[in-house]
Amino acid sequence: MDEQRIVHGDSPLRFFVPSRTVGGETYLVDLAGPVCQCRWFQTSVAPSLRRGEKPRKMCYHVLAAREEFTDWAIKAFAQQEKNTHAQTK
Ligand SMILES: [Zn+2]
């Protein structure tokens, strides 16, 4: 079986993150919320956020999506900087 990978959604802030425990399950994560479709997020993280508290433990999918976003953003900004320097020369 192929290792499941994080897939970018229709916005740079949205990702489909495969579940580590439920085979074949994939959750849509929106980092703008943050929002995740998994059970842990719905039952533990979301209620904390609604109360304005810091969640005890953020769900794995949001953390994984954040890392994916960071990699994407660093690449994008690095490329932009390269282009800017190329233009000013
Ligand atoms: Zn989750």
Image (tube, grey):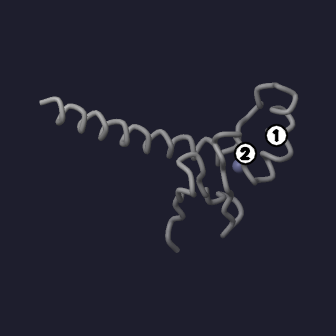
Which numbered tag is attached to residue 46? 1
| Residue at disc 1, secondary structure | helix
Q: Tag 2: residue type?
A: Val
User: Could you say where residue 76 lies in the image, as x and y percent from the top left?
Assistant: 37, 42
Q: Is the Cβ of the residue at disc 2 closer than 8 Å to that at disc 1?
A: yes
Label 1 beta carbon within 8 A of ligand 1: no
Q: CA distance from mark 2 to mark 1?
A: 8 Å
| Residue at disc 2, secondary structure | strand
Left or right: where 64 falls relative to 29: left
User: Could you say where residue 30 lies in the image, as x and y percent from the top left?
Assistant: 66, 47
> Which residue: 69% across, 65% down?
25
Quick one: label 2, few (<14), some, or many (20+) residues within 10 Å?
A: some
Quarter of the image with the C terminus is top left
Left or right: where 66 falls relative to 42: left
Q: Is residue 47 above or below residue 37?
A: above
> Which residue: 36% across, 36% down?
77
Chain-order first, disc 2 or disc 1: 2
Q: Is residue 84 above or below residue 26?
A: above
User: Could you say where residue 37 lies in the image, as x and y percent from the top left?
Assistant: 75, 54
* Image quarter of residue 6: bottom right
